Amino acid sequence: MARRALTTAVGLALLAPAGAALADHAATPQATDNGPAPAASASGAPQAVNLHSITVTAQKREQQVSDVPIAMSAYSGAFLKDMNIQNAQDLSDYVPGFNAELQSPNTPGYQIRGLTSDDTAATQTSRVSIFQDGVDISRLQGSNVAMFDMQRIEVLRGPQSTLFGRGAESGAISLIENKPVDATRAGYDLSLGNYQAMQFSGFANTPLSDNVFGRLAVYSATHEGYYENLSGGRLNGQNTVAIRPSLLFKLGDDSSITLIGNVQRDTPPGTDFHSRTIPNRYGSTDVWGPADLNRGKQLGIDRRLGGLTMLGDFKLNDDWRLTSITGYRHVDSAEKLDADGSPYDLVEIDTHVRSHQFSQEFRFNYDAGGALTAFGGLSYFQDDALEHVTIQYDESQFFPYVIVDGLPRFFPSGYVPGALLGQPTDLPVPYVQQLLRQQLAAFPQINPVASLLYSTPVPFNTNMSEGYADSSNTRALDAFADGTWHVTDRFDLTAGVRVSRERIRSGYQVYNTTVPGTLGFLGLNNGFMPVTPNDLFAPTNGKVTGQGSFTSVVGRLVGAWQVGDHVNAYASVARGRKPNVIQVSADGSETLPPEILLSAEAGVKGDAADGRFLYDVAVYRYRYSDFQSTIYQDARYIVRNAGRANAHGLEMSLQGKLSDHASLLFNYNYIHARFADTDKNGNPQQWAGNRLRLTPDNSASLALLWDIPMDGGRAFYVRPSYSWKSAVYFEDDNNPNYYQKAYGLLNLRLGMTFDRGAWDVGLWARNLTGEKYLLDAGNTGATFGLPTYIPGAPRTFGISLSGRF
């Protein structure tokens, strides 16, 4: 079970990514379909360079990205295709301050400016909001969706609760998919690669009547898995199928209703939780070599996503518009994983998550062409989630690896209390370990401690199974307003506020083992208080619940200056919030205070050299209070109040036009994110001075987009890119065993376009140098003294073919 708590990293906005055709307003058919770019010359070669800013709707109205006083990046569907960007992890290479790790479809991790969202518990809310066509899809198990037939992606950094809702404490990612248009056209993209990789996406768009247009987009992606499992099958693979039908109904000249359906199913093989403690059957603990995970081909995920969205855009009069966003979403995801990363039956986990979500937003936009531009409205959010977790193990294997080997961890004083062993005095840990190993060697199926205490042989339970269920029911009603006052021709003042009223109910229930275990009397996972008949979980004797109602206020204040004809600057302060957590255990419930983020930011965006050079630079300072960090306790992940933390950073994005057919992109991100020395009461903090997890102090990326026009409407293109990150810790306690040193990845895409870009044949490669790196370390196994490590993808390569007609 790979959860990820939070971290702090920095970002900036890449202004208008160079690409064959930058996305414009949805009403533009060419941009909507990511079709052929305009001719750059008589040869008809597509342009690699287009330094005009992309149109975005981050502030709920259409603006050029260079005019938005927010640190943000916006990328067109054409740019995603040009750079072979297939998921959030690929995208993060081009967005300063944004990091993503995709262990599996079920457990993605998103981090913006150091705040990480990767906790899969039903009771947890995300720090990073993910929106799909205006609908919140932030629940972690359902947030990793296939990116196909995209119009554009917008990534906003910093608190965005005013614009994107209660969960956007550290930022928001907005996925805008192509909508139906009044045109008949179709297209496809096909890619084949090593590891038996195959990816296909296609779309067809057609008018159904004068005022009704339809679109159908499909997607399929598979590969066998990067790493062999000696116990059967492969690991870290993909098997995804998705379909998206949509209809657009025109209501007069300037109003419309759009219906969108999203269905996706993922059935990949298991995740490679690789042990460095227990070797595979060949004696190897090489993380990038063959794994040997128990249950073989049974490991894996079966995830089903379904959603229905209705978008209403209505012109009320020349000054007012009404937007309605209605969304229903369903997630059903089951996973089988080997949390100990070994061939032994030690920590085998099954999870099953179900959630149902409904949301409705009404927003009124006002723009009379005068000094005030504003929007305001109401939104309702309802989410019901249930997570079942079952842990299965063989006590005869669990006891020597977890209990005996783990005695120094359970008893850091170096002595085992004599009472646990029926002895009058405490005994040294090494002595007890030696004694127990001798007993196990002679009688491997007998629990030596229980037999000693009960004066009779007590056999291990070789098929121990116990578990729990977490549940959460959330109801939230928001009122929001945001307005920009154009004080002068060159100075704007923007203020926004969102007031939320939430009702949260959390539940927790332990499901006891049907055959009693023989280790629960030790209470090693419960402060030495017995948990019989279980070994790990203290019985709840039914469902324990907790509930509460909360009110929050978040907002922003922004000043924006047009310094000159080619320079825009801004400064902002904002307040973000992660909602209260109602945490339930066998002992009852407790309510943790909301995590509060106070942000101050300043930035400048502009162009120089007659528009051949674009820049976007931002600096910021963060102060966190009641920082919510995730730890493993009592055999489950819980949230603790880690006190205060601080961060400051610099984000820089540069884009230069080297020639009429070549451009260079460069992003740099610096962040200094640390836990404060003292809490709000002046008391020393446990993790004082530690880095926030998964937060590289420095990161950078560089990309070249170069087209070489040829006769007959053909062009040759080259797209090399390189991304680099400094070292990170995988846990907030900065355990040096869970650490990734600095590394960089080189990617390449090259090929030929025909018929002015209508057809494309290419070659691609990722991680061209075969860099070995980790996606995660520690994980659930670490809490049992069996840490696991998840290797990143090796070198991959293949061919691609695409067409538009």
Image (spheres, grey):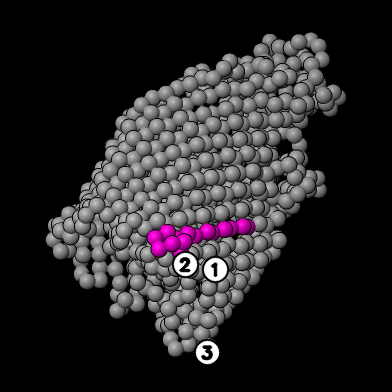
Q: Secondary structure at mark 3?
A: helix
> Which residue does the numbered mark 1 point to in the structure image?
187
Q: Quadrant of residue 72?
A: bottom left
Q: Which residues are magenta?
A: 207-221
Residues under numbered marks 2 and 1 in contact, where contact means CB atoms less than 8 Å apart = yes
Crowding at dot 1, Cα within 10 Å, few <14 / some 14-19 / many 20+, comes out as: many
Crowding at dot 2, Cα within 10 Å, few <14 / some 14-19 / many 20+, comes out as: many
Q: Return the residue found at the far right.
A: 442
Question: Amino acid under label 3?
Answer: Asp
* Residue 323 visible to the viewer: yes
The reply, left or right, for residue 701 in relation to residue 532 is left
- Is 214 magenta? The answer is yes
Q: Nearer the viewer, mark 3 or mark 1?
A: 1
At horizontal 40% and vertical 32% (from top left) the residue drawn is 475
> Which residue does the numbered mark 3 point to in the structure image?
711
> Which residue does the numbered mark 2 point to in the structure image?
33
Q: Main secondary structure of the magenta part?
A: strand
Question: Amino acid under label 2?
Answer: Asp
Q: Secondary structure at mark 2?
A: loop
Residues under numbered marks 3 and 1 in contact, where contact means CB atoms less than 8 Å apart = no
Question: Amino acid under label 1?
Answer: Gly
